[in-house]
Image (tube, rainbow, N blue to C red):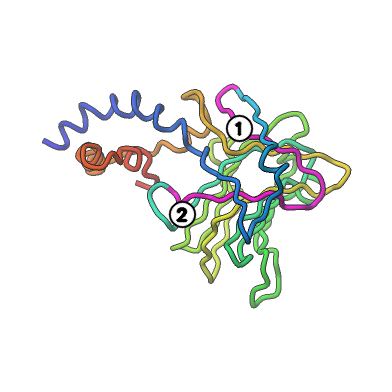
Amino acid sequence: MCALVSRILLSVIVIDAAFAISTDLGHAFTLECDDFCSCTPMEVESQAFIHFPDETCEVQNLTGYEYRPCYKIPPHFDSDNKIKVFFKFQGDSDGHVRLEDKIGQGYEVVFGSWNNVNTEIRTIHKDKSGEDLKALHQTVGILSPEEFRSFSIEYDKNEKKLEVIELETRQKKLLSWVDGTSFDLRYVSFSGFHSDKIVQVAFNCTATHKSSIMYLTSLALVTVQNMCFCMRDQFTDLRLYRCMFMEGV
């Protein structure tokens, strides 16, 4: 009975409900002003937004190498031990993303380092090896001064794994790193590198159309078993969202 109901309602729920639910994906960072991550009144009041064909995002101009302000990342929707950060960069080179815990441990991911030639994963703390560079992949021209390019970073605390994904070419994985230590990564911030160049970052994005990269990369296949779970669960605690976008199923 469960399988039959799932087949009948799968298309209805996925097509009609999924997009309405998915429009909030990624629009979840909050400006964090606390002892760890301070911010100025100007930073609090200086929010600006940019409209793309399929998303609306908050936007910042980045100059120099300074990670301010920082934003708190909520837990991944299906696990407290996963996070996923979606963003876009536009610039000649050197779009930097910093993910860290409350004691300054974590990772820096650099898009277009060395004059837009490489993408790198670095640690922001010193580990036993003494080296901060953990993974490097040649990605010539990864950033563009003419257009925004979309990326995501995913971290699984249980697997101690960080993955960097380029979204313009159907979720092409650029590089990954598995560490010996897990971190409770809860903050994200962005930076450029050159003081005489501007890199723009778009983040806190909300999908506004079904063709959004955010939507297409968040909707995973749902098995019959999980579909049945969803249908039961939506009447008990309204967690249809959790099931519809359960990744890795």
Magenta stretch in the rendered image: 53-76
Q: Which mark is residue 178?
A: none
- Give residue 147's quadrant in the image: top right
Q: Residue furthest right?
A: 196
> Between residues 17 and 114, which one lies in front from this camera angle?
17
Residue 226 percent location from the top left of the image = 26, 43
> Between residues 179 and 35, which one lies in front from this camera angle?
35
Residue 63 percent location from the top left of the image = 81, 44
Above or below for 18 versus 71 = above
Q: Residue at x 68, y 38 (%)?
A: 45
* Residue holding disc 2: 82
10 Å neighbourhood of mark 1: few (<14), some, or many (≥20)?
Answer: many
For residue 137, say whether it is visible. Answer: no
What amino acid is at disc 2?
A: Lys
For residue 9, say whether it is visible. Answer: yes
* Residue holding disc 1: 57
Residue 50 percent location from the top left of the image = 65, 28
Above or below for 208 versus 196 = above
